[in-house]
């Protein structure tokens, strides 16, 4: 029976289908919000799904000179990693499907794996745009990853556990950590934007410079899978940040409201800025983001040590 | 715009090399120079800060055949004073005009190489970088040979454009079908 | 050997002919070392249509409509340059009202072109919100142009000897209303481009060109004016209505992309001021005079300030009803050299903005060959096309 339920958890809910559907809907919400902010109409609700089906049906053109196994395998690994990460987060405000001590680290690693796959996929081809895109993707990975991690570490330290579900429970029972650790929240949110390569951190796929960066050579299924991976990452990222900073996720309604509120903030941020150059991105993260997150973290440690928290 | 830069000043500057000059329009003067002196002329204008190179126009002058036309050409050339410098070109030739603009004044340096075969003109791109682009166009559109051009590759025409076909010549009526 | 090793470490990034950064075809090769550009070359001609040659086969009136197709954005400018040149050759002067209307359409076109450019520049910098906003507001001026001339692009406002559309009172009041709206929007854009930190981060100190450099390279138009070069045909050699309605030249000293942006946005205000003034003091009278079919022998250089800089036409007439030679020098072609000169040392990410910074117009730069393939039905000859067109609209 437990095999069946874990299979269900993997395939239907919270992993697999439900997550894919949620990812597509969140992508639509994001696109629609940005469009509205930019005075455009935006896509219809099923557009992301239609895009995905269209791409899945298309022929994947494998360019010359690539490692075929990697070319086919990387998108699959990327989606698998994102789906795996979903097992540890309180999706829809329910208890995670799987949980163990320290699963925060695993979840974060799984999310980074997607970006790594993206970078490798770009570096795998001979296309110049892909290679430059891959370089930028990886450069960006190194710049936002540490601050993002540090910003999620703050709540973990306060809660005294590295298990996502426990932090979620702790957050639900205490003051919202957006109030106690505002800097951490900002860094986490902006870090999420960097992770998802949303504007203004979209230098790795800046279409006016390098076409679509690492994904330039992907045309069919691979592209669809990478997009799905990104969508799932969006949902997971929003879930993580709102679970940690917005007072935990205990029921589906709270999940919906909190993540959508975050998405709205993301959409506003996306439409407010011009794209940062990759050197500006790195500078911003290491000079400002990492420093702020570190200060916040030290503060948390000191306060915790002195018994205030 | 410098109010001191008038046509008188330009005439003065170009005096050592100018063969003749005439006013084509109230605000346009044409000065004929030998292609061997072109660089000195341009340098003199640049040094004095007289205007800027605005464009280079190429022109294909079809040759004259019947005697009346030849007579007309002779009389025109002797009027202009050109005849004391060179015999008239009876065959096809190119005329290259270098337009310098200053305020509302336009000064054309006029270079007239003798024939299509001997149509070399010096490149100005060492003195004026942008001239390189105009010269590339001149070269591929007319077949004027620009000496010492830093980058003489095609600028506007396709890479597979047939050699020796110059679209802005008067005798160009379209590419043959098979191209 | 060392050269070979160096070449291995460097990377040539082609931008174009088809590339999402460029809305028109042009080919650039940037040699990059990491992200830093160390070399740049340009290759044009993908939108070459043979207009210079085509002009020699058509009479003067037809030629004017042909040159209007040199550029889709500054079409009025080309037709006006041609008309002014031809009128000068024929010793015809268009009436003052026509000259004022030419100025009016020219300035409306400048507003439309500068707003289009601002949107493109914002898009190149990944600032899509500004892009969408400017293009939405640009519709206002497009509608005004349509109302005035009947067309959104390729207005055909000129005829040889004048213009063919008159400004009536209702149209004038609509234009004034539009100007009020646009002025308010332009103020908003000026605020954004000069205060938004991310946009400043992409434009400040990028592609800096000093006045001396600009002078040496031969920069013209807003690109030159952003480097402090007071070069504007409207001021230096006033034509059409600019004799009676003088402009104030907008210059900036920065020489970088920011300065180029500011110059263009500030020129919006200047254009709006000028349009108001013209509408206020529009000279009465005829809007065109008769122009002879044959144009006397002679040569003329006709210069007009397009939104991108100086347009120069060298027009030579042999006394027939067809021009002997029409040489078109568009502003973009002069400014290419500035991109090639300032690109080196910048980051690859700056290239699209730097390219767009001169407001390049590829179809302007490309002109002049026609390829006649008479038997192939895929390609229509001029005659066939004309017959088809005449039949279509009959």
Image: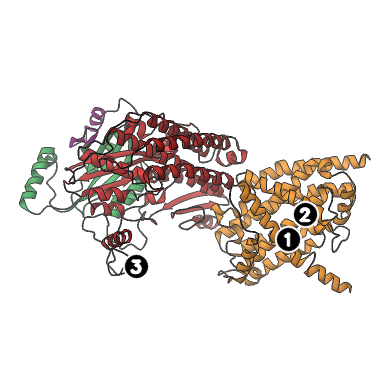
Q: In this orientation, which residue lies closer to the viewer: A56 or B22?
A: A56
Name the residue carrying label 1. A22
Which residue does the image show at 24% across and 46% down from the upper left? B96
Name the residue carrying label 2. A256
Q: CA distance from mark 3 to mark 1?
A: 50 Å
| Crowd tier of the residue under label 3, counting other residues whose Cα lies within 10 Å: few below 14, some 14–19, many 20 or above | few
Name the residue carrying label 3. C378
**Which chain identifier belongs to the orange chain?**
A
Q: In this orientation, which residue lies closer to the viewer: B117 or A156?
A: A156
Residue A212 coordinates in the image, percent (x, y): 58, 57
Chain to which the residue tagged by mark 2 belongs: A
The segment highlighted magenta reads B1-29
Which residue does the image show at 68% across and 43% down from the upper left? A284
Tell me the quarter of the picture where residue A25 sits: bottom right
| Crowd tier of the residue under label 1, counting other residues whose Cα lies within 10 Å: few below 14, some 14–19, many 20 or above | some
Q: In this orientation, which residue lies closer to the viewer: C212 or A230?
A: A230
Q: CA distance from mark 3 to mark 2?
A: 57 Å
Element type where label 3 sits in the image: loop
Q: Are marks 3 and 1 on the same chain?
A: no
Chain to which the residue tagged by mark 3 belongs: C
Of the chain colours in the picture, the one used for chain C is red
Q: Which mark is residue C23?
A: none
**Which chain identifier belongs to the green chain?**
B
**Residue A194 seen in this snapshot:** yes
Q: Which image quarter holds the C terminus of chain C?
A: bottom left
Q: Determine if the magenta segment contains residue C371.
A: no
């Amino acid at each position: 029976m437990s095999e069946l339920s874990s299979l269900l958890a993997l395939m239907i809910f919270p992993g697999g289908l439900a997550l894919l559907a949620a990812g597509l809907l969140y992508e639509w919400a994001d696109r629609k919000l940005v469009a509205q902010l930019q005075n455009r109409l935006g896509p219809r609700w099923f557009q992301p799904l239609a895009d995905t089906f269209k791409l899945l049906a298309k022929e994947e053109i494998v360019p010359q000179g690539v490692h075929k196994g990697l070319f086919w395998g990387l998108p699959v690994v990327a989606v698998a990693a994102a789906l795996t990460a979903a097992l540890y987060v309180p999706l829809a405000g329910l208890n995670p499907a799987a949980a163990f001590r320290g699963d925060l680290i695993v979840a974060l690693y799984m999310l980074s794996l997607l970006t790594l796959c993206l970078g490798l996929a770009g570096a795998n081809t001979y296309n110049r745009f892909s290679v430059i895109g891959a370089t930028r993707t990886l450069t960006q990975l190194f710049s936002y990853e540490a601050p993002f991690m540090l910003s999620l570490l703050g709540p973990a330290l306060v809660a005294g556990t590295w298990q996502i579900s426990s932090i979620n429970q702790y957050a639900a029972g205490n003051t919202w950590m957006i109030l106690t650790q505002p800097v951490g929240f900002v860094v986490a949110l902006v870090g999420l934007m960097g992770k998802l390569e949303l504007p203004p951190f979209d230098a790795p796929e800046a279409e006016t410079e390098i076409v679509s960066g690492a994904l330039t050579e992907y045309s069919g299924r691979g592209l669809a899978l990478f997009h799905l991976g990104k969508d799932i990452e969006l949902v997971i990222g929003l879930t993580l940040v709102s679970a940690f900073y917005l007072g935990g996720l205990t029921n589906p309604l709270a999940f919906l409201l909190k993540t959508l509120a975050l998405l709205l903030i993301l959409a506003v941020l996306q439409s407010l800025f011009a794209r940062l150059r990759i050197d500006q991105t790195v500078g911003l993260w290491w000079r400002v983001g990492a420093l702020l997150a570190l200060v916040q973290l030290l503060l948390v440690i000191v306060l915790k040590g002195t018994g205030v928290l | 715009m410098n109010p001191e830069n008038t046509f008188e000043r330009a005439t003065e500057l170009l005096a050592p090399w100018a063969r003749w000059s005439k006013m084509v329009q109230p605000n346009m003067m044409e000065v004929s120079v030998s292609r061997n002196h072109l660089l000195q002329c341009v340098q003199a204008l640049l040094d004095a800060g007289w205007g800027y190179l605005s464009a280079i126009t190429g022109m294909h002058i079809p040759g004259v055949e019947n005697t009346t036309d030849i007579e007309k050409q002779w009389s025109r050339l002797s009027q202009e004073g050109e005849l004391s410098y060179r015999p008239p070109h009876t065959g096809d030739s190119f005329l290259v005009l270098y337009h310098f603009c200053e305020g509302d004044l336009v000064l054309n340096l006029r270079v007239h190489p003798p024939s299509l075969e001997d149509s070399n003109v010096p490149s100005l791109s060492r003195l004026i970088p942008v001239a390189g682009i105009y010269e590339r166009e001149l070269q591929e559109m007319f077949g004027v040979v620009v000496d010492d051009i830093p980058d003489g590759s095609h600028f506007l025409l396709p890479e597979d454009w047939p050699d020796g076909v110059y679209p802005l010549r008067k005798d160009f009526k379209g590419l043959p079908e098979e191209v | 050997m060392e050269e070979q090793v160096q070449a291995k470490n460097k990377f040539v990034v082609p931008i174009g002919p088809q590339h999402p950064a460029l809305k028109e075809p042009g080919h650039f090769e940037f040699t990059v070392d990491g992200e830093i550009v160390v070399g740049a070359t340009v290759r044009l001609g993908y939108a070459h249509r043979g207009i210079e040659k085509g002009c020699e086969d058509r009479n003067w009136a037809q030629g004017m409509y042909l040159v209007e197709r040199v550029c889709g954005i500054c079409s009025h400018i080309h037709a006006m340059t041609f008309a002014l040149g031809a009128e000068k050759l024929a010793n015809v002067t268009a009436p003052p009202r026509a000259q004022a209307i030419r100025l009016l359409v020219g300035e409306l076109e400048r507003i439309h072109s500068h707003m289009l450019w601002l949107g493109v520049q914002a898009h190149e910098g990944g600032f899509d919100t500004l892009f969408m906003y400017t293009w939405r507001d640009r519709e206002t001026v497009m509608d005004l142009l349509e109302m005035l001339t009947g067309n959104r692009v390729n207005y055909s406002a000129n005829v040889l000897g004048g213009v063919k559309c008159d400004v009536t009172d209702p149209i004038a009041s609509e234009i004034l209303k539009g100007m009020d709206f646009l002025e308010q929007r332009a103020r908003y854009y000026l605020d954004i481009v000069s205060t938004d930190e991310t946009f400043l981060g992409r434009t400040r100190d990028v592609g800096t060109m000093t006045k001396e450099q600009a002078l040496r390279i031969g920069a013209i138009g807003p690109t030159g004016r952003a480097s402090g070069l007071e070069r504007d045909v409207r001021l230096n050699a006033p034509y059409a209505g600019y004799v009676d309605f003088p402009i104030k030249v907008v210059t900036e000293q920065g020489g970088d992309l920011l300065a180029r942006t500011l110059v263009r946005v500030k020129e919006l205000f200047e254009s709006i001021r000028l349009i108001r003034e013209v509408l206020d003091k529009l000279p009465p009278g005829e809007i065109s005079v008769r122009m002879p079919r044959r144009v006397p022998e002679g040569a003329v250089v006709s210069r007009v300030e397009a939104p991108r800089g100086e347009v120069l036409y060298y027009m030579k007439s042999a006394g027939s009803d067809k021009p002997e030679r029409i040489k078109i020098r568009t502003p973009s072609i002069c400014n290419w050299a500035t991109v090639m000169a300032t690109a080196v040392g910048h980051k690859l990410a700056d290239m699209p903005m730097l390219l767009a910074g001169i407001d390049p117009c590829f179809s302007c730069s490309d002109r002049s060959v026609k390829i006649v393939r008479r038997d192939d039905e895929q390609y229509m000859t001029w005659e066939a096309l004309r017959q088809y067109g005449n039949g279509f609209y009959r």
